[in-house]
Image: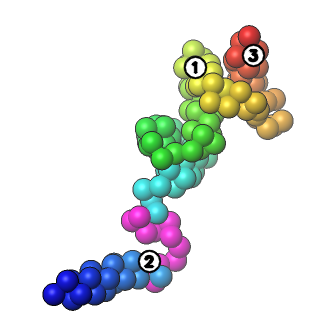
Amino acid sequence: MLGRRNVLMGVMMVWLLSGCQYLNSCDECWWYNRTPSAKLDKGVESYAEGNYIASMAALKDVLLTKLADKDDKVSAYKYLAFIHCVSGREKLCYDAFRKALALKPDFELTPAEAGHPVWGPVFRSAKAKSGK
């Protein structure tokens, strides 16, 4: 009886997971959308579209996920900082950069990001104070 149960469970798992092969990409699979990387991708995509509310929700999900790696969390803090800065919330922008730097002290913005007139100076300030 135990053998039949294992075979049945195996068949059910194959059946459940096989549906993803018919979709265009794993982005549409239920199990992929729950990963920290997928949440980060969604947050960055929403940010690029200017949907800051959806972006913040996805980025905060990344930060609350215990399985998220350090780089994902640093990226989430970076984009949250960008959102706060362009929304006129300089203190929250600074705090997000500070948290990113606490996770990864050698974190740097790209040259284009660092030259941004709104968040560039805030990042440089946070970076200078994190080194002390």
Instruction: Identify the image quadrant of residue 85.
Output: top right
Secondary structure under the numbered disc 1 in the rendered image: helix
Residue at 39%, 65% (x, y): give it: 30
Residue at 68%, 31% (x, y): give it: 104
Secondary structure under the numbered disc 2 in the rendered image: helix
Q: In the rendered structure, does residue 26 fall within the stretch colored magenta?
A: yes
Q: Earlier in the sequence, mark 1 or mark 3?
A: 1
Residue 72 falls left or right of residue 1: right
Which residue is disc 2 drawn over? 20
Q: Which of the labelled discs sits on residue 95, or is there none?
A: 1
Q: Position of residue 88 (x, y in %)?
A: 58, 20
Q: Which of the labelled discs sits on residue 131, or is there none?
A: 3
The answer to whether residue 1 is above or below residue 88 is below
Instruction: Identify the image quadrant of residue 89.
Output: top right
The answer to whether residue 56 is above or below residue 102 is below
**Residue at the right extreme, as displayed:** 111
Q: In the rendered structure, does residue 30 fall within the stretch colored magenta?
A: yes
Q: Which residues are magenta?
A: 22-31
Residue at 58%, 33% (x, y): give it: 77
Q: Which amino acid, by three-letter code, is at mark 2?
A: Cys
**Residue at the left extreme, as displayed:** 1
Q: Which amino acid, by three-letter code, is at mark 3?
A: Gly
Residue 15 falls left or right of residue 113: left
How far apart are the two marked residues, 2 and 1, measured between alpha carbons? 40 Å
Q: Earlier in the sequence, mark 3 or mark 2?
A: 2
Q: Earlier in the sequence, mark 2 or mark 1?
A: 2
Front of the two marks 1 and 3 = 3
Q: Between 118 and 41, which is closer to the camera in this rendering?
A: 41
The quadrant of the picture occupied by the N terminus is bottom left
How far apart are the two marked residues, 1 and 3, measured between alpha carbons? 15 Å
